């Protein structure tokens, strides 16, 4: 067959084989578009994170004594700070919070796409692997419960350590690059606590690669983390330390630590043989320093995700770093193998096609029904009715589990978040949620998710007005208790 026909046939075959990848990319793009502006939570914590950013934007404290009427989440602040900055420019809303998360996932995909194009033996192989890597990240979306575009720290906490790893590079670090990498490593820890596994590995890698610059990077990173910790603790009169380190509220469920293995292997079956593949590449002298660094990042993601999953109260969002890193790093290792095989051109090309065929087969098996993640017309109608109801209440209002809805609808009193108080009580803090509601000064409380016992406590200071009569269930949030509207009891009014 003439070379031009052979190349044409190969191009047609490649386009056909990449069809499952195109499906995943198109599907996730459509889901992002359909979900972006939906004005209620897809998951319990979205509105709560938006309200934390709102407090920063309006110069209200986060890490404070909860007896003052607000119990924060025991998270480091980077996501809220970035979210508040984005909101300052674009307007704080559900869509801006989701856009931040989507931007981080897309950014990670682009970083790995560039790496694969650079590391592959030819441009067409690099471009094909970049498409497969991006599609693999998209294919992990349903396995995280749709976490990629949620207003949560996970996407940012995945992108920041990837940026840090890029800054560390392959060679010896210059002073400027060391300082930038140290800031990125410190930001990794202040994006989410599990970032410590990424930071630990990257510092070990940097020291092993070049002892002098690696130790300088470790010292600079430690100094940045310590300075931030001391600054935040001093500014909050010690409450930052209390909320981050003294909570001890979530027990580790040791028997559940292995549960993530099944979804990880379903998404990336090669994980079962990855240690053997890395050992084989190293024995042949084909393992690049860059691939070694990224393989350690994947190992850190696996450890962090499995430990986070074993925590009581965890959810599928903790899988996000693994699903973002797994395939791109597996394909980087494939690039090392292909470069090693390249002198034997026929074998290398056969191996390339084998990788593409196997990858496309896995992506084909991972197709899913996207409608279960998309908001329906009925959900939009319920959301709009809910906002109209909250806005129409003639006085300050607290919404127990959707606090950002209150401020978005013109209510400016403090929003005591129910989950924050639950965390505080579980940690042994002597606080009471109804006291927090009373301190807020709100005339109304819109209850969206409280059990019977909590209703009885609420009745000591508020009276039931009416049922909410709006269905707030979404694909990620089933609210088993009926929504209700309560009004503050007037002075002297006793409980019936």
Image (cartoon, rainbow, N blue to C red):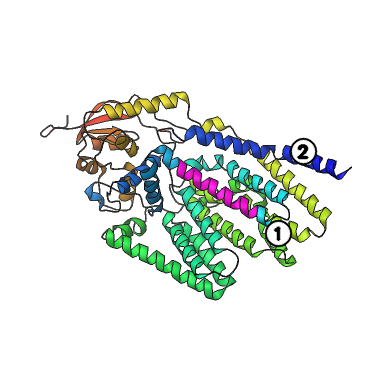
Q: Quadrant of the N terminus?
A: top right
User: Which is more toward the observer, 47 or 56?
Assistant: 56
Looking at this view, name the residue that lies furthest to the front: 4
Location of residue 117 in the rendering, given as x and y in whole percent from the top left corner: 66, 52
Q: Quadrant of residue 364?
A: top right
Of helix, strand and loop, which one carries label 1? Answer: helix
- Find the distance from the CA under tag 1 to the CA under tag 2: 26 Å
Residue 332 visible to the viewer: no
Q: Is residue 317 left or right of residue 77?
A: right
Q: Kindly identify which residue carries mark 1.
A: 336
Location of residue 80 in the rendering, given as x and y in whole percent from the top left corner: 38, 49
Q: Kindly identify which residue carries mark 2.
A: 12
* Predominant SS along the magenta part: helix
Residue at 32% in and 58% down:
240
Q: Quadrant of the C terminus?
A: top left
Q: Is residue 239 left or right of residue 268?
A: left
Location of residue 290 in the rendering, given as x and y in whole percent from the top left corner: 63, 62
Whether residue 113 appears in magenta in the rendering, the answer is yes
Whether residue 41 appears in magenta in the rendering, the answer is no
CB contact under 8 Å: marks 1 and 2: no
- Mark 1 neighbour class, 10 Å CA radius: few under 14, some 14 to 19, many 20 or more: many
The residue segment tinted magenta is: 99-116
Of helix, strand and loop, which one carries label 2? Answer: helix
Residue at 36% in and 59% down:
245
């Amino acid at each position: 067959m003439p070379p031009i026909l052979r190349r044409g046939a190969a191009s047609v075959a490649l386009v056909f084989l990449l069809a499952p990848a195109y499906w995943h990319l198109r599907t996730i793009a459509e889901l992002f578009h359909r979900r972006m502006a939906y004005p209620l939570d897809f998951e319990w914590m979205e509105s709560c994170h938006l309200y934390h950013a709102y407090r920063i934007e309006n110069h209200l404290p986060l890490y404070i004594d909860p007896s003052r009427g607000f119990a924060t989440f025991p998270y480091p602040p980077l996501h809220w700070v970035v979210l508040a900055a984005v909101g300052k420019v674009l307007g704080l809303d559900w869509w801006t919070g989701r856009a931040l998360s989507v931007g981080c996932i897309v950014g990670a995909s682009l970083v790995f796409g560039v790496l694969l194009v650079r590391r592959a033996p030819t441009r067409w192989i690099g471009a094909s692997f970049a498409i497969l890597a991006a599609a693999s990240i998209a294919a992990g979306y349903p396995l995280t419960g749709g976490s990629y575009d949620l207003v949560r720290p996970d996407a940012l906490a995945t992108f920041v350590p990837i940026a840090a790893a890029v800054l560390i590079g392959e060679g010896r670090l210059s002073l400027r690059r060391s300082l930038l990498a140290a800031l990125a490593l410190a930001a990794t820890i202040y994006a989410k606590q599990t970032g410590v596994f990424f930071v630990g590995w990257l510092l070990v890698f940097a020291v092993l690669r070049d002892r002098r610059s690696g130790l300088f990077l470790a010292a600079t990173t430690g100094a940045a983390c310590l300075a931030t910790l001391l600054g935040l603790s001093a500014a909050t009169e010690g409450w930052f330390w209390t909320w981050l380190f003294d909570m001890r509220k979530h027990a580790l469920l040791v028997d559940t630590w292995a549960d993530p293995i099944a979804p990880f292997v379903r998404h990336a079956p090669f994980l079962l043989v990855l240690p053997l593949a890395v050992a084989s590449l190293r024995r042949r002298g084909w393992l690049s320093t860059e691939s070694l660094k990224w393989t350690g990042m994947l190992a850190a993601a696996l450890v962090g995700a499995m430990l986070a999953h074993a925590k009581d109260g965890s959810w599928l969002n903790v899988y996000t770093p693994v699903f973002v890193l797994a395939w791109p790093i597996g394909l980087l290792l494939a690039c090392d193998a292909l470069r090693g095989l390249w002198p034997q051109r026929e074998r290398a090309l056969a191996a390339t096609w084998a990788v593409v065929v196997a990858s496309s087969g896995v992506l084909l098996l991972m197709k899913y029904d996207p409608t279960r993640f998309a908001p329906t017309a009925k959900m939009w109608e319920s959301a709009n009715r809910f906002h109209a109801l909250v806005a129409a209440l003639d006085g300050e209002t607290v919404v127990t589990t959707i606090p950002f809805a209150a401020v978005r609808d013109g209510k400016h009193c403090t929003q005591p978040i129910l989950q924050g108080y639950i965390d505080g009580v579980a940690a042994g803090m002597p606080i009471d949620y109804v006291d927090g509601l009373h301190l807020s000064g709100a005339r109304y409380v819109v209850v969206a998710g409280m059990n019977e016992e909590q209703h009885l406590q609420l009745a000591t200071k508020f009276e039931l007005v009416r049922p909410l009569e709006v269905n707030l269930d979404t694909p990620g949030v089933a609210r088993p208790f009926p929504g209700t509207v309560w009004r503050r009891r007037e002075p002297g009014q006793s409980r019936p």
